[in-house]
Amino acid sequence: MRCAVLQFGGSNCDLDAVHVLRDVCGVETDLVWYKEGLQRKYDAIVIPGGFSYGDYLRAGAIATRTPVMKDVIRHAGEGGLVLGICNGAQIGAESGLVPGIFTTNAYPKFICEEVCLRVENVTTPFTSSYREGEVVRIPIAHKEGRYVAPPETLEMLNRENRVAFRFCNAEGEITPESNPNGAAENITGILGENGNVLMMMPHPERAAEAVLGSEDGKKIFNSMIAYVEKQ
Amino acid sequence: MYTAIITIELKKGMLDPEATAIRHALANLGFETGALSSARMFKIELEAQDKEAAQVTATEMCERLLANPVIHSYSVEVRE
């Protein structure tokens, strides 16, 4: 398996993602500066977190219009895996890889804390290592993470089982109190139409080593590796 | 040379947390207000064959970058 982690001006979780993939998971991983484009075929692309282009205009809006994103969209169209984390998810939504948008939190401050997520779909290349309904602890760190989509889009996502993660309480209940940013239906992980794209606000790469307090996020990378190895 | 005045707003009914915070801050200063919304304005100078062409180009800028159709509406006014 070979993975690429994209790096834009203002990405700042790129090296964390590379560390987890290379050192924790043992995956061959290239850090790809956006101007280089994708020079070879990859099994998976990670769009990491950060503040690409200072979040100017809208979070992710500028990075979305760089040529490397055409490569990413092509890669996704060919069935390759794409994982967008935080700013990467904002870029993925702006790019149309998933519908909707991540915008300013309902209470407009930056939230950096560990949250509980309920795994809603374990049949995807990103979540097969989880149990259905499993409650996992993964941190969030964002100010523009409130998922918004028109009612018909939310209905479609539910119908097509394209919600990967929702904010929940420790018991796995989806409640307004456990929704830190006001996201529609507590949604914070959305799958692309073919299941090979996942855009999520929480940071699994920050929860992939016991020393950091949680290994719950590592299962996303484990799932991706298992999926690619089975191909 | 034309100037396109582009205004990007949240669609009606969209939550605007920043506007809510601004409204609270105004209230702290003693300004009691009704509904308050914010918008973003761009002034863009551009060359075009005529005013209509400038309008078309500015609209395309909105569609392709300046606005996100999920949450935004926009208006374009072209001045000579």
Image: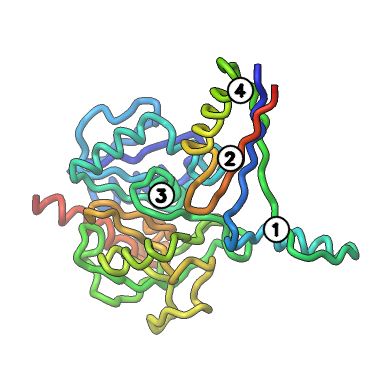
In the picture, which quadrant includes the N terminus of chain A?
top left
Q: Distance between the residues labelled 2 and 4?
A: 29 Å
Compared across the picture, whether A141 is left or right of A15 comes to right
- In the rendered structure, which disc, 3 or 2, sits on the residue that comes first in sequence? 2
Q: Distance between the residues labelled 1 and 2?
A: 18 Å
Q: What element carries label 1?
A: helix
Given the image, on which type of amino acid does mark 4 rest? Lys
* Pointers 1 and 4 within a single chain: yes
* Pointers 3 and 4 within a single chain: no
Q: Which of labels 2 and 4 is toward the front?
A: 4
- How many labels, in total? 4
Q: How far apart are marks 1 and 4 (CA)?
A: 34 Å
Given the image, on which type of amino acid does mark 2 rest? Tyr
Residue hosting label 2: A56
- In the rendered structure, which disc, 1 or 4, sits on the residue that comes first in sequence? 1
* Residue drawn at point x = 20 percent, y = 34 percent: A41
Residue hosting label 3: A93
* Pointers 1 and 2 within a single chain: no
Q: What element carries label 2?
A: loop
Residue hosting label 4: B51
Q: Distance between the residues labelled 3 and 2?
A: 16 Å
Q: Which chain carries label 3?
A: A
Height in image: A79 above or below A167?
A: above
The answer to whether marks 1 and 2 mark residues whose Cβ atoms lie closer than 8 Å is no
Q: Is mark 3 on a helix, strand or loop?
A: helix
Number of residues whose C-alpha sits closer than 10 Å to that of mark 3, classed few (under 14), some (14–19) or many (20 or more): many
Tag shown at residue B19: 1
The answer to whether marks 3 and 1 mark residues whose Cβ atoms lie closer than 8 Å is no
* Pointers 2 and 4 within a single chain: no
Given the image, on which type of amino acid does mark 1 rest? Ala
State the scheme by which the image is colored.
rainbow
